Every structure is written in structure tokens, then in C-alpha cells.
Image (cartoon, helix red, strand yellow):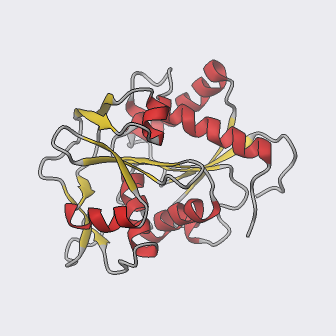
């Protein structure tokens, strides 16, 4: 990664295993163009395969990390490492769909001490499953999300209710929610049945994870407010020269 230069364009790591068959991946270049054209938020985006993200220095020098959809990832360890790097360094973070699931998994293992919890998509035979198959798959579905007042999610969305699009079959087991909350993870958005749909870290500059896919909103020419907020956070991070390699 090149050395940081003053007033450089914000660099964003797109952590995921890029595939033309993943609709969210195909949308991202259009979204980046729209951010630059409509919002003057110019991002220099690099795709980082999850296997590469396992390396300790793979995400050095980035102003934001976006853990994109497309699970099962080739490397669970790489996805976990991306979420941990952002959480510990204060780098702006967005995790969508599989990114949400792995951000929650990372927090459970490394903050809550629940080292034995697993993701059902990766290890379906495991006894302690934090990420479990949803009772009803959300692949191709839209649904209401109710958002907590005073949360980062509410500030970003500008509303306490939103309708979002999904493409997932896994979510968070309710058995572990109290432990996650007790250690500081805030579940700031739920569906109409009370199932978790948004998570955030209140003490972090910008750490937001959604089970839904904001990449799929509209036709891609008008970025979702959550994607715009990540871009703004990345640009601010770059302007302040906040990157530190340690």
C-alpha cells in the first residue's frame, strides 16, 4: 500500500470475494461513480479477497473498510480480521449481509470472550452457533426495519423506519444478544417481529453493520444513505490523516 500523502483521496477496502454473479458486487462500481458525481465523495476503492485480508498488514493505509456481501467467504478468518482491524483501529466500517454476520461474530469472539461460537453457514455441525439459519429465508425479500432513536443508524437514515432489501438466509441467534449488548454492541434496528437487522458500536467513530443490503436500493444511481455515510466518514478520515499503522 502506498505511503499516506496529505490531502489524498480516501482509500476504501472492499473486503470480499468479488464475483460477477453477486448482484451487490456488480452494483458497487456504479455506486462509487454515483458518489463521486452526485455527492462529490471520491473514493479510491480496492478489492481485497478475504484470503488476503488474513494478513496482518493487508488493510494498512485504508480510510474505511467495507465488508461486502457474498458469503460463504473463502476465508472466514479474513472476514473476521477485517472487522477486528476496523474495530480496534477506529477505521470507519460498514458490514452488509455477510459482513454484518461476521462483524457480530468477531465481536462475540474477541470482545465477549465467546471464542467457541460459530457461523452455521461455515460450520453447520458446531454446537454453539451465534449465526443461525433464519426461520424464513430473506433472499429476494423486502422488509420494514424499525430504528432506535438517537442511534448512528437513525442519524444516517434520517428516519426511525425504513424498508430495505435482503439477500440472506442467516441471522443472529437470540441466545447471545444479551451478552453482546452487555459488552457494548448496540442492536439499533429490528424488523417488525423484533429480529435484529442493524448493529453498531456507539464508541467507534463509524461502525455500522446491516443484515440487509443497501447496495440493492433503487437502480444504483442514487447511493443509499448508509453507503453515502460510509463514504463521508472515509473522506473525513483521509482529510484528518487519521491512519496509524500500529
Query: Does residue 92 appear to the left or right of 159 in the view shown?
Result: right
User: Residue drawn at (66%, 26%), measured in percent from left and top?
Assistant: 36
- Residue 102, horizontal then vertical, whole percent: 40, 61
Determine which quarter of the picture holds residue 91.
Answer: bottom right
Determine which quarter of the picture holds residue 37.
Answer: top right
- Is residue 159 among what the camera can see? yes
- Residue 77, horizontal then vertical, whole percent: 46, 71
Q: Name the residue at the right extreme.
A: 6
If the image is split into quadrants, where does the N terminus sit?
A: bottom right
> Closest to the observer: 40 or 123?
40
- Residue 217, horizontal then vertical, whole percent: 39, 27
> Closest to the observer: 7 or 21?
7
User: Residue drawn at (23%, 51%), measured in percent from left and top?
Assistant: 169
Is residue 188 placed above or below 89 in the rendered structure?
Answer: above
If the image is split into quadrants, where does the C terminus sit?
A: bottom right
- Residue 6, horizontal then vertical, whole percent: 87, 45
Is residue 35 placed above or below 56 in the rendered structure?
Answer: above
Q: Name the residue at the left extreme.
A: 135
- Is residue 29 among what the camera can see? no
Amino acid at each position: 500500500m502506498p505511503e499516506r500523502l496529505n490531502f489524498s483521496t480516501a482509500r476504501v477496502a472492499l473486503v470480499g470475494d468479488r464475483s460477477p454473479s453477486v448482484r451487490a458486487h456488480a452494483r458497487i462500481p456504479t455506486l462509487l461513480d454515483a458518489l463521486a458525481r452526485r455527492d462529490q465523495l471520491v473514493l479510491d476503492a480496492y478489492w481485497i479477497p478475504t484470503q488476503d485480508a488474513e494478513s496482518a498488514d493487508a488493510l494498512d493505509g485504508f480510510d474505511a473498510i467495507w465488508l461486502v456481501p457474498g458469503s460463504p467467504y473463502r476465508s472466514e478468518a479474513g472476514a473476521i480480521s477485517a472487522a477486528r482491524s476496523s474495530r480496534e483501529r477506529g477505521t470507519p466500517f460498514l458490514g452488509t449481509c455477510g459482513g454484518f454476520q461476521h462483524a457480530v461474530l468477531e465481536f462475540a469472539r474477541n470482545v465477549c470472550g465467546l471464542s467457541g461460537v460459530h457461523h452455521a453457514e461455515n460450520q453447520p455441525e458446531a454446537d454453539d452457533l451465534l449465526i443461525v439459519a433464519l426461520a424464513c429465508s430473506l433472499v429476494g425479500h423486502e422488509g420494514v426495519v424499525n430504528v432506535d432513536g438517537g442511534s448512528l443508524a437513525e442519524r444516517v437514515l434520517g428516519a426511525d423506519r425504513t424498508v430495505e432489501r435482503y439477500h440472506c438466509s442467516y441471522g443472529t441467534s437470540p441466545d447471545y444478544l444479551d451478552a453482546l449488548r452487555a459488552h457494548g454492541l448496540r442492536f439499533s434496528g429490528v424488523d417488525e417481529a423484533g429480529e435484529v437487522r442493524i448493529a453498531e458500536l456507539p464508541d467507534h467513530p463509524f461502525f455500522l453493520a446491516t443484515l440487509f443490503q443497501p447496495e440493492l436500493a433503487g437502480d444504483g444511481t442514487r447511493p443509499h444513505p448508509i453507503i453515502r455515510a460510509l463514504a463521508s466518514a472515509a473522506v473525513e478520515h483521509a482529510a484528518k490523516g487519521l491512519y496509524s499503522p500500529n
